[in-house]
Image: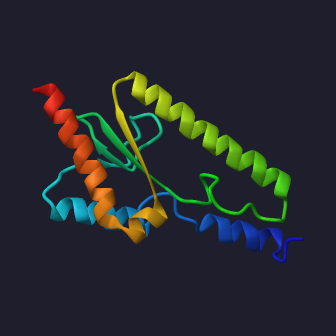
Amino acid sequence: MDTHTPEQRRRNMSRIKSKNTKPERELMKALRNNGIWFTHHRTDILGKPDIVFKRKKVAVFVDSAFWHGKANIPENNREYWIKKLERNRQRDTEVNSKLAEQGWIIIRLEEHEIKKNLTICLEKIMCALSNRQQRNQ
């Protein structure tokens, strides 16, 4: 049973950010500090990647554990959340597949990965950019 009124729940949910989260900002700052230029939150690219290297066709998504189905499912309204989170996972798979068909390299990082080891996340991105550059030469 939910302990919040519908209005309280609506207000709480409306405050959850979908872009410019702290892990995203930290990753973007680290990329800039390393002299790596990018665009972000491109709505013209399927899935609206959080970080985009358009010329090299590399898309980076920063996923939260909850919204991408890797955290515990709430006990309240459990059937709704199972269905919702499963659809999010399906959408991730569809986006990955379609972007790959278009020649994109897709990198999915979880927020906790960025918080735990930013250096490894940067290396994944730089490796993808480097591999793409080598192929184009």
Against 41, is 114 above or below?
below
Residue shown at the point (22%, 49%) measured from the top left? 126
Residue 125 spot, x, y in % from top left: 28, 49
Residue farthest left in this picture: 137
User: In the rendered image, which quarter is residue 87 located in?
Assistant: top right
Q: Residue at x 70, y 44 (%)?
A: 86
The quadrant of the picture occupied by the C terminus is top left
Residue 53 shown left or right of residue 69 in the figure: left
Place of residue 103 in the rendered image (x, y in percent of width and height, measured from the top left): 33, 25
Judge whether 17 appears above or below 124 on screen: below
Tally of numbered tags: 0
Q: Position of residue 9 (x, y in %)?
A: 75, 69
Q: Residue at x 62, y 56 (%)?
A: 70
Q: Residue at x 74, y 60 (%)?
A: 73
Query: Residue farthest to the right?
Result: 1
Image coloring type: rainbow
- Answer with left or right where residue 69 lies relative to residue 60: right
For the N terminus, the image quarter is: bottom right
Q: Is residue 48 left or right of residue 53?
A: right
Which image quadrant for residue 100? top left
As rendered, which of 50 and 128 lies closer to the eye?
128
- Residue at far bottom of view: 3
Measuring from the top left, give residue 45's x and y in whole percent: 39, 35
Near-viewer residue (124 or 3): 124
Up-down: is 77 above or below 126? below
